[in-house]
Amino acid sequence: MKEIATIAKEALASKTGLPGIVTLLDLMLIDGKNKNSTIHAASAASTHVFCKLFERKEFSKKTVNAMTDSEKKVASWLREHLDICTSRLTDLLASNEPSLQTFAVDCLLKIVREETINLMSSQKSDTEWVFENTIFSKLVNALCSKSKVNDKKDSRGVAITSHVVELLSTWDDLKLYFMRNLGKLAKSQPDSVDVSIAFEILSQLHSEKELTGNNWVTETTASKISSKKRKRSGKSHVKASSEDDSSNEEDEAATENILPPQSKTAHRKAFTDCWLAYLKIEMSMEVYKKILLVMHKTIIPRMTQPTLLIDFLTESYNAGGAVSLLALNGLFTLINQHNLDYPDFYQKLYTLLDENLLNVKYRSRFFRLLDLFLSSAYLPAYLVAAFVKRLSRLSLVASPSAVVIVIPFIYNLMKRHPAIITMIHQTEPSESEGDLFDMSENDPAKCHALESSLWELHSLHMHYLPSVSSLAGIFQEPLTKPFYDIEDFLDLAYSSLFDLEAKKELPEDVPMAPVMKKSENSGSMDFFVDVVAM
C-alpha cells in the first residue's frame, strides 16, 4: 500500500514520475493476481492522480494550446491513460466484490466532476451549463449492459443498484444524464442491455416533482452559473460532451432562471425517451410482469405523452394469461384519463375469465379492476349477465377462498343491475334441453347468458364449507341487504377460512354417532351411544 501511495506522489511531483501511472493501472486489473485490497488502493490512487491533474489544468484546452510539441505529447499520453483508467474502473463493476463495485462508481463520478469543472474553465462564457458526459455515459453503459466476464452469472446485485439509485436520487444532473444515456444505449445496442438491472434502477427513480436542486458539479460552480444567468437576458447556453445531443428542452431552464438539471420538462422528456426505448427491448417474463405492475403508478403519470404506450399495453393485454391481467391497470388508465378508444375491451376482458383466473397470484388485483369496469349502470344487461354466469360456472371448481370473492361480487352486480335478477328465478333446464349458456363462446353477446339460470349459486348453497354455504344463502332471500365491501373478501386465503371455522364455538350438546363395543360376556358387538371422549 505504501508503494502505491509513493507511486502516486511521484506521478504528481514531476513529469519523470508519470510512467508510474502505468503501474497503477496494471494493479487495477482483475486478473486473479491482484488482491481486492490492492485493486482498491490502486483505483483510489489513480483517481486521485487524475483529479489533481485536472485541477492543475493539464487537460484544459487553453493550457494545451499554449504547450510546446513535447508537452502536447505528454498531454496526449495522459489523456490516453485517463481513458484506460476509466475503462479499468468500469471493469470493476463486474467484480465479485460489492465494495469494489460501489467504489468504482464513486471514483468514476469524481473524475466526471473534475473534468466537468475543467470544461467549464475552458469555455468562452462562464454562464454556460456543462456536463462531461463522455465518461459518465461509459459508466452507464457498463452498469446497464450484460456482464461479459467469462460468461459467468452476473455478480452485480442489490449493493451497486441501491448505491446508484441513492446517488441519482440525490443529484439531479446525474439522474437526468443517466436517463438520457440509458435511452441511447437501448436504442443503439438493445441486445446488450441488462433489462433486469436497468429496471431496478429506473423503477426506483424519484419523479421530477421531487427534484432536490442539487447537482454533482461543485456547489460553488453551480451557484456561479446560476447567479450569472439571472443577470442575463435571453436564452442560456447548454453544453455537454460530443456524445450528448440534449437540446431545446433546456429553454424552460433559461426562462425560469434555473439550471437545466432542475428543469422538470427536461426530466420528463428524458424519462419518456428512456422508457420508450427500453420497452422495445426483448425481456424475460419476470421483468415484463414487473413493468406492468408499476406501469399505472410509476410510468404513465410521468410520461410527456402517455398515449405512446398504447401499442405496448394493447399487445400485453392481447397476450393472455397473467400478462393480460397485469396490463389491465395501465390500459384502463389510458382509457379513463387519456381518451384511448378500445372497442373490444369488454369482450377481451370476458375472455380472461377462465379456469386459471381464480387461482392466479394477481386474483385480488383483477377483481378490484373488474368491479370498477362493471360499475357503470349503463352497461347492457346481456354483458353483465355474461360475466355473472361465467363467474358462477368457474366457482364450481374453485377453492373456497376464491368462491367467497365470487359470491359477494355477483350479489353487488345484481344490486347494481336489477335487470339480471331474473336469472336467479329462471326455470332450470331439463336434461334434454341442457343449459343454454355456452361456456366456450368468447363473445358475451352470443353466449346466451341472460337466457340461462344461476343454478350454480344453488349448488354453492350446499358447499361442504359452512362459511361458503351460508354466504351463498343470500340468494335464497330477496336482495334487500346493502352492498358488500369486496375488500373484506379479497385477501382471504384457505388458511384464514380454516382458522375462522376452527375458532367457532361448538354447541354444548354435540350429536355423536353410535360406537360399537365388544360385549365382555357374549363376545358379540353391542351398540352404545355413550359420548366418546374427544
Image (cartoon, grey):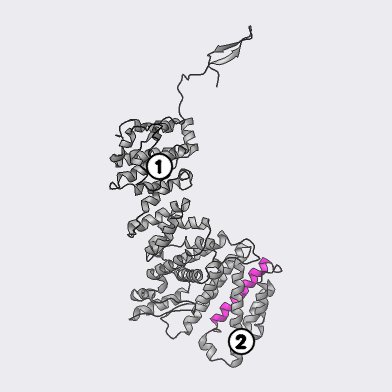
Q: Residue 32 placed where, x, y %?
A: 70, 67
**Is 44 in the magenta?**
yes
Mark in front: 1 vs 2: 1
Q: Which mark is residue 74?
A: 2
User: Where is the C terminus found, in terms of image quarters?
Assistant: top right
Q: Residue at x 35, y 42 (%)?
A: 448
For the residue pair 113 and 461, the one nearer the viewer reads as 461
Q: Please, what secondary structure does the residue beneath circle 1 have? A: loop
**Is 117 in the magenta?**
no
Q: Residue 4 placed where, x, y %?
A: 67, 74
- Number of numbered callouts drawn: 2
User: Would you identify the image quadrant in which residue 5 lies?
Assistant: bottom right
Q: CA distance from mark 1 to mark 2?
A: 83 Å
Relative horizontal placement of residue 160, taking residue 240 as reference (left or right) = right
User: Would you identify the image quadrant in which residue 248 lies?
Assistant: bottom left
Q: Image height check: is 368 above or below 81?
A: above
Relative horizontal placement of residue 100, taking residue 389 as reference (left or right) = right
Label 2 neighbour load within 10 Å: few <14, some 14-19, many 20+: some
Residue that numbered label 1 is attached to: 438
Q: Which residues are magenta?
A: 30-55
User: Would you identify the image quadrant in which residue 59 lies?
Assistant: bottom right
Amino acid beneath label 1: Asp
Q: Residue 206 placed where, x, y %?
A: 44, 62
What type of secondary structure mainly makes up the magenta span?
A: helix
Q: Residue 413 placed where, x, y %?
A: 33, 41
Q: Residue furthest right?
A: 33
Relative horizontal placement of residue 120, taking residue 371 as reference (left or right) = right
Q: Is residue 49 visible?
A: no
Q: Residue at x 61, y 70 (%)?
A: 91
